[in-house]
Amino acid sequence: MSRHERERFLAGRRVAVLVTIAPDGQPVPTPIWYVYRDGAFYFRTADTSAKLANVRSNPRVSICVQDERPPYRAVTAHGPASIEPELPWLARGIPRRYLGAIGAFAYNRVSQARVERGAEVTIVVRPDRVTTIDYTPETPFIGRAWLTLKRILPPWL
């Protein structure tokens, strides 16, 4: 993907998989909501989460954001993570990004206390290496048309 295509892809409403390293050296993949802004990934997490403990002991992380529908596309990023205090714009923006205005309002009123237990912090990753895959160019027009139609047809077709 070109830089513009990558930026557009990361602006979409996809879930990232943040991979941290546990103290025993094992990779720990975690699906997580994110915001990508100015070349950095921003994640919110509880200050008691395992992923935060992992970042504190080893800041090297990787991130994968993918489109699970064919033709497949993905962005994988690697780099150091930093821990920052909770960012108010992120606390407001993440629920709205994934749930929309009405869903975010309901989340903040009803679910937030159940989902977010305790204080929140921000994990910021400014990647030093990014790779992409995009199988769209290799997929013929008729194939892309069928895949688009398949999204609205019953699954057994």
Image: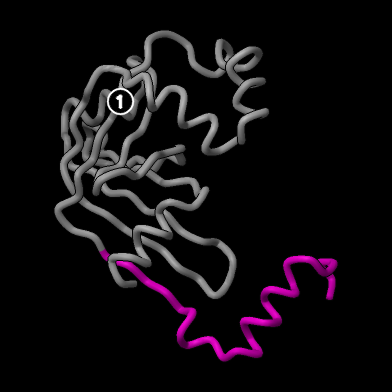
Judging depth in this view, the residue of 46 and 14 nearest the camera is 14
* Residue 32 percent coordinates (x, y): 45, 38
Q: Work out whether 12 lies above or below 50.
A: below
Residue at figure coordinates x 46%, y 85% from the top left = 137
* Residue 110 percent coordinates (x, y): 66, 13
Q: Which residues are magenta?
A: 131-157
Judging depth in this view, the residue of 104 and 29 nearest the camera is 104
Residue at figure coordinates x 21%, y 25% from the top left = 83
Q: Work out whether 36 lies above or below 50.
A: below
Judging depth in this view, the residue of 85 and 29 nearest the camera is 85
In the displayed structure image, the side of residue 21 where residue 72 appears, left or right: right
Q: Circle 1 is placed at which residue position?
A: 122
> Neighbour class for label 1 at 10 Å: few (<14), some, many (≥20)?
many
Q: Work out whether 149 lies above or below 113.
A: below
Q: Quadrant of the C terminus?
A: bottom right
Q: Quadrant of the N terminus?
A: bottom left
Residue 152 sits inside the magenta stretch = yes
Colour approach in the figure = one colour
In the displayed structure image, the side of residue 116 where residue 80 appears, left or right: left
* Residue 125 percent coordinates (x, y): 23, 40
Would you identify the image quadrant in which residue 86 lies? top left
Residue at figure coordinates x 34%, y 25% from the top left = 50
In the displayed structure image, the side of residue 150 where residue 1 appears, left or right: left
Kind of residue sitting beneath label 1: Thr
Residue at figure coordinates x 62%, y 17% from the top left = 111
Residue 148 sits inside the magenta stretch = yes
Would you identify the image quadrant in which residue 54 lies? top left
